[in-house]
Image (cartoon, rainbow, N blue to C red):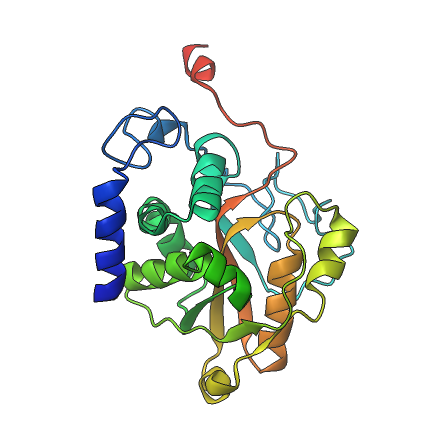
């Protein structure tokens, strides 16, 4: 994080002290009491899209028949409960320091993903349109990706730019999401040489819902000669039930 970024976070923390996004307790964006409710993805997931599976199987109903541009996708947590609150609070309340806290929570799954891939040449992110960046005052995915790369000792670069704003993906159906991001990204002209010199690229975003945004970004990177993989802080897992406190008492 740059000195200017740290200063901005310090000003926000001074006038808006951190409070748990779940219970409101002061001190952290996710307190020690609420943090255990974060639901990691299970060990058995689809090797392609990362969807949780009840048992190992050769096909996955979420990505069956889809021509996805990324080689694999992994996530730290199920997009439910505290994970959902963290993502939406960071995105819609423009809290820069919350992205750093999310990176800390996702550090171990991120580093495990890098290890499973046999190493990563570069970390990049799904870019927002400049207009939306101005609205929020920061790019959430870029902050998350940059901090994760820093924690893992990996290089980071913003390889992509968003060419049109489009609608918010939240609330759209699968077909609408695909149309909304089709041809919405391109390689940053300033990064063409860098993209041509790297092989394995890990694309970071906050949430995997249908995978269409990550697919659109990965298509550009694959065309540039990279092998793109995806990592998100959270993943929508429609067929997976998050464990509850009651489960541990059974």
Snapshot quadrant of residue 33: top left
Q: Count the marks.
A: 0
Q: Where is residue 83? Give x, y as percent.
A: 45, 37
Q: Position of residue 244 (x, y in %)?
A: 47, 20
In the image, what residue occupies the spot 34% across and 46% down?
Answer: 98
Looking at the picture, tell me which residue is in the foreground, 206 or 162: 162
Of residues 108 and 1, which is closer to you in this image? 1
The image shows residue 59 at horizontal and vertical percentages of 71, 48
Q: Residue at x 67, y 57 (%)?
A: 212
Can you give x and y, in whole percent of width and height, for residue 190 in the image? 47, 86
Which residue is more in the foreground, 42 or 15?
15
Q: In this picture, is 39 found above or below 105?
A: above
Name the residue: 44% across, 60% down: 139
Q: Nearer the viewer, residue 128 or 237?
A: 128
Where 27 falls versus 213 (above or below)? above
The answer to whether residue 107 is visible is yes
- Which residue is drawn at the image coordinates 50% and 44% (left, top)? 234
Q: Is residue 40 visible?
A: no
Q: Residue furthest bottom?
A: 193
């Amino acid at each position: 994080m740059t000195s200017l970024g740290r200063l901005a976070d310090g000003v926000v923390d001074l006038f808006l002290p951190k409070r748990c996004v779940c219970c409101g307790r002061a001190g952290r964006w996710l307190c020690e009491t609420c943090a255990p409710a974060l639901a990691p993805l299970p060990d058995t997931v689809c090797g392609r899209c990362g969807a949780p599976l009840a048992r190992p199987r050769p096909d996955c109903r979420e990505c069956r028949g889809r021509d996805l541009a990324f080689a694999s996708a992994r996530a730290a947590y199920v997009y439910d409960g505290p994970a959902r609150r963290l993502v939406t609070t960071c995105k819609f309340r423009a809290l820069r320091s919350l992205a750093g806290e999310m990176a800390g929570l996702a550090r171990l799954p991120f580093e495990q993903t890098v290890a499973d891939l046999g190493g990563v040449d570069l970390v990049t992110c799904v870019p927002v349109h400049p207009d939306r960046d101005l609205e929020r005052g920061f790019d959430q995915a870029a902050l998350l990706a940059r901090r994760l790369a820093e924690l893992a000792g990996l290089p980071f670069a913003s390889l992509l730019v968003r060419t049109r704003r489009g609608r918010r993906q939240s609330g759209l159906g699968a077909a609408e999401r695909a149309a909304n991001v089709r041809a919405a990204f391109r390689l940053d002209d300033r990064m063409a040489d860098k993209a041509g010199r790297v092989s394995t690229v890990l694309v970071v975003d906050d949430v995997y819902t249908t995978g269409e945004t990550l697919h659109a970004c990965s298509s550009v990177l694959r065309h540039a000669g990279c092998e793109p993989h995806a990592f998100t802080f959270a993943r929508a897992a429609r067929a997976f039930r998050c464990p509850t406190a009651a489960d541990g008492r059974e």
